[in-house]
Image (tube, coloured by chain):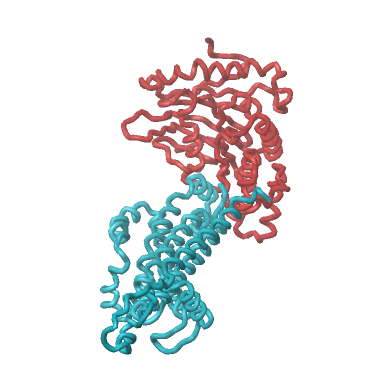
């Protein structure tokens, strides 16, 4: 019993840290009872209306209490898919919109980055020729593309997808090129001596050899895409978790904002876990 | 250029990696007959692997020609199977898939069952039937090298090129695989060109041993005919009366004589040099 594995002990510690954080939250946001001196001037009714009633007042913190948070969680999660018009949709629908945009933009980026990465990985000439452009385009914040996207595409939703595309394309492109360019020379020599056709070589040797590196690039891209979608939807508006968050801020509903933040974190974590699983599936021991 | 009817012929081969620097090797001339097992020995840096790569078609020589069956070697071919120094197995494929990949390359029209059957036959030959579904990372160094050998044999090449195949193996494993290779080669009458650093390995396996002088300006200094009987075995090799003359000759070359030609060669004193043919123990034309 006294020798628990590091994993179990870590989990226990995580729970303790969470409970402590929640405790702290509770203490900080707990309503303070303050006795205010009673000024018996003017109408007491007026004073009551102004929140200056006789006796003690309860000074409320603007930050939601744990009870309020629990209420928000319960409300949002018990009806995740309700739809009461453009400004009032359930969290499930909003997340689905965001995931849809990310998925579409990511898929388009994959369709471009992997074949193109293959090309520049195989050809040192192509690599040299395209590298300066990639190096300049890569560090540009994807949101900087937003005005150009909105101007040329003229559709805010598609512009959001474009922004996801442009931010996911670079890590995938560079990792694919790197993985393809660094396939062990020995293995390529084997395919040469076996006179393997270019197609068989690409799909049966280079692709599996570079797959772990390509998936690392995809995992980085997905991480960035999920970061960017929130910001993009805040700008573009309409639907999605980013818009939901901004909308709740305009409603001054901090508890919903916090709820949205936690949901973003959870979904991001799940996406990362999924890609970690995929990565493990294609990796090989040398 | 007209060539005689030897199986493999190399003429005036030389290679420099940088323009202006002395060639690693030059004036390399030798022939290999069908069914012959030829070893090449020399110190590191004399270009043995480069010669093998030229024969495999993986590298181009700076000068000179290599012919197989009267056709110039240009680029890799399924006629020449290569066993690489570091096994070079696809790490994501199982043992069987690795061999089947090669078989499928050689016989693209075979159906799956034929390919599997053929691959299994060659895996059985190197004693790896039970490991066919393992990944290379699950195998020992000796087993990996056996898969490499099975893969090279499975494409039934006209010639086999082995680049120090046992270099990374421990002595016991090395001995076992040497015996296997000897058995397989005598059964299949395979023509083999092999690089080795191990004098005993060369004596055990080869019909003739080519000795290279040191590089740069390396040449094939001597071609030593193996004077030991054909049915030699690792177990009784060192009891053969020819063994010590043979071994001493090879070691003497590596220790003492391999530097001499380099000096002569770098001053251009060896143009048109033909290697000396030696039969140690029978007659030794070179005196110390």
Say whether residue B274 is left or right of residue B187: left
Q: Residue drawn at (34%, 86%), measured in percent from left and top?
A: A48
Q: Residue drawn at (57%, 37%), measured in percent from left and top?
A: B162
Q: Position of residue A205 (x, y in %)?
A: 52, 54
Number of numbered markers = 0
Residue A57 in which image quadrant? bottom left
Q: Considering depth in this image, is B239 or B265 the residue closer to the camera?
A: B239
Q: Is residue A34 visible?
A: yes
Residue lying furthest top: B288
- Is B63 rendered above or below residue A140? above
Which quadrant, please, contains the N terminus of chain B? top left
Q: Is residue A197 visible?
A: no
- Is A280 rendered above or below residue A249? above
Q: Considering depth in this image, is B85 or B59 the residue closer to the camera?
A: B85
Q: Position of residue B46 (x, y in %)?
A: 46, 28
Q: Residue drawn at (30%, 64%), measured in percent from left and top?
A: A141
Q: Position of residue A112 (x, y in %)?
A: 40, 66
- Is A226 rendered above or below residue A201? below
Residue lying furthest front: A40
Chain letter tied to cyan? A
Chain letter tied to red? B
Q: Residue drawn at (66%, 49%), measured in percent from left and top?
A: A2
Q: Considering depth in this image, is B194 or A179 the residue closer to the camera?
A: A179
Residue A119 in which image quadrant? bottom left
Q: Position of residue A39 (x, y in %)?
A: 29, 80
């Amino acid at each position: 019993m006294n020798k628990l594995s590091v994993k179990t002990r870590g989990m226990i510690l995580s729970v303790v840290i969470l409970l402590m954080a929640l405790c702290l939250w509770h203490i900080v946001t707990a309503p303070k009872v303050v006795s205010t001196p009673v000024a018996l001037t003017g109408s007491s009714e007026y004073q009551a209306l102004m929140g200056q009633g006789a006796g003690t007042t309860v000074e409320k913190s603007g930050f939601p209490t744990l009870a309020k948070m629990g209420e928000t969680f319960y409300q949002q999660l018990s009806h995740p898919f309700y739809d009461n018009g453009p400004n009032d949709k359930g969290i499930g629908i909003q997340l689905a919109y965001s995931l849809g945009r990310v998925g579409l933009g990511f898929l388009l980026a994959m369709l471009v980055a992997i074949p193109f990465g293959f090309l520049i990985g195989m050809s040192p000439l192509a690599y040299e020729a395209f590298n300066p452009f990639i190096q300049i385009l890569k560090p540009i914040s994807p949101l900087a593309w937003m005005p150009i996207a909105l101007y040329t595409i003229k559709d805010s939703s598609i512009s959001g997808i474009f922004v996801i595309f442009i931010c996911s394309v670079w890590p995938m492109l560079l990792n694919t090129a790197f993985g393809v360019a660094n396939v062990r020379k020995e293995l390529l020599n084997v395919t040469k001596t076996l006179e393997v056709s270019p197609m068989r070589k690409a799909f049966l040797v280079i692709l599996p050899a570079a797959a772990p590196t390509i998936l690392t690039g995809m995992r980085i891209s997905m991480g960035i895409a999920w970061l960017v979608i929130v910001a993009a939807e805040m700008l573009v508006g309409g639907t999605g978790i980013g818009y939901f968050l901004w909308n709740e801020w305009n409603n001054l509903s901090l508890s919903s904002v916090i709820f949205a933040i936690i949901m973003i974190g959870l979904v991001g974590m799940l996406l990362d876990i999924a890609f970690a699983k995929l990565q493990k599936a294609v990796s090989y021991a040398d | 250029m007209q060539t005689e009817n030897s199986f493999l012929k190399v003429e005036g081969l030389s290679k420099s990696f940088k323009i202006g620097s002395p060639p690693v090797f030059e004036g390399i001339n030798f022939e290999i007959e069908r069914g012959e097992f030829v070893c090449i020995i020399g110190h590191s840096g004399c270009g043995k692997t480069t010669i093998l790569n030229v024969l495999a078609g993986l590298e181009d020589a700076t000068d000179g020609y290599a012919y197989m069956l009267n056709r110039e070697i240009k680029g890799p071919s399924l006629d020449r199977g290569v066993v690489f120094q570091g096994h070079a197995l696809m790490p994501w494929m199982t043992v069987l898939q690795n061999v089947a990949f090669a078989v499928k390359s050689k016989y693209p029209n075979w159906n799956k069952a034929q390919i599997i059957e053929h691959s299994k036959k060659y895996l059985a030959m190197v004693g790896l039937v039970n490991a066919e579904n393992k990944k290379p990372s699950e195998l020992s160094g000796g087993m990996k090298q056996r898969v490499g050998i099975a893969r090279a044999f499975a494409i039934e090449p006209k010639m086999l090129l082995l680049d120090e195949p046992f270099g990374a193996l421990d002595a016991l494993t090395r001995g076992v695989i040497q015996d296997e290779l000897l058995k397989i080669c005598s059964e299949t009458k395979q023509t083999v060109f092999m690089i080795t650093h191990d004098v005993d390995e060369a004596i055990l396996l080869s019909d003739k041993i080519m000795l290279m002088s040191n590089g740069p300006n390396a040449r094939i200094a001597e071609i030593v005919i193996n004077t030991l009987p054909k049915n030699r075995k690792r177990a009784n090799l060192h009891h053969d009366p020819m063994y010590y003359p043979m071994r001493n000759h090879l070691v003497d070359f590596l220790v003492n004589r391999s530097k001499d030609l380099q000096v002569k060669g770098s001053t251009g004193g060896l143009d048109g040099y033909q290697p000396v043919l030696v039969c140690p123990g029978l007659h030794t034309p070179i005196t110390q």
